[in-house]
Image (spheres, rainbow, N blue to C red):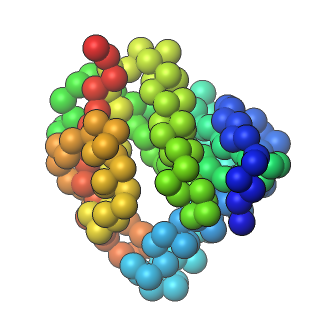
Amino acid sequence: MNDDSAAVVIRRAVASDATDLAGFASRTFFETFALSTSAANMSAYLIESYSPEIQRREIEDPERATFVAHAGGLLIGYAQLTRGPEPDCVHARPAIELQRLYVAPDWHGRGVAIDLMGECVRAALQLRAVAIWLGVWEHNVRARTFYMKQGFVQVGTHLFNLGTDAQTDLIMERSIVR
C-alpha cells in the first residue's frame, strides 16, 4: 500500500540494499510474469536471478548501475543498467542495456518509472553511452507502451529463457544524445 504523502527518493543502490532488493525484485518479477510460465520455471528463474548475494554482486559490479526508489521507508521500485555487448540490431554505439525497471503495482502511474528512467539516462550519459537498449516481453503491453512513450523504438527480437521456457523479447532502442 502506498502513502500518498510520502516523497519518492531515488538513489544509487549500495550493498546494504541487497536483501530488500532481492525480495522486491523476486516479488515484482513473480507478480508480472507468473502466469506466463510454469511454477517450476518461475521458481528456477527467481533462485538463479534474485538472491541477496546475487543482488549484492550486481550492485557492486562496476559494469552495472542499480537505482532504488523509496517512499515512506519502503522500496517501491528499481532500475538497473548493464554495460556489455549490444545485439546486432542495436544501431547506436556505444549503447547500454536497461536490464531491469520495475515499480510496485501500488505505485504504477505515479511517475516513479519516469523518474527511474531519468536516473538511468543521466547515468548512461555519464558512462558515455549514446543510446539505451532493452528487451521487453512481447506480451507485456503495459511495459511496451511505457517504453514507447519514453522514446524507445523496436529494432529487433531475441529469446529470453525463463527457466526452460524460451520467450520472445522485443529489442527496443532509444537515443540519449541530442
Measured as percent of width and height from the top left, residue 37 is found at 41, 81
Measured as percent of width and height from the top left, residue 148 is found at 28, 45
The residue positioned 54% from the left and 73% from the top of the image is 31
List the single residue furthest toward the bottom. 39
Residue 92 picture quarter: top left
Q: Is residue 79 above or below residue 166?
A: above
Pick the quarter of the image with the N terminus: bottom right
Residue 127 visible in this rendered orientation of the protein: no
- State the count of labels: 0
Measured as percent of width and height from the top left, residue 144 is found at 31, 55
The residue positioned 17% from the left and 43% from the top of the image is 155
Measured as percent of width and height from the top left, residue 135 is found at 33, 50
Pick the quarter of the image with the C terminus: top left
The residue positioned 55% from the left and 50% from the top of the image is 110
The residue positioned 38% from the left and 20% from the top of the image is 129
Residue 94 picture quarter: top left
Residue 117 visible in this rendered orientation of the protein: yes
Residue 25 picture quarter: bottom right
As drawn, is 44 to the left or to the right of 19?
left
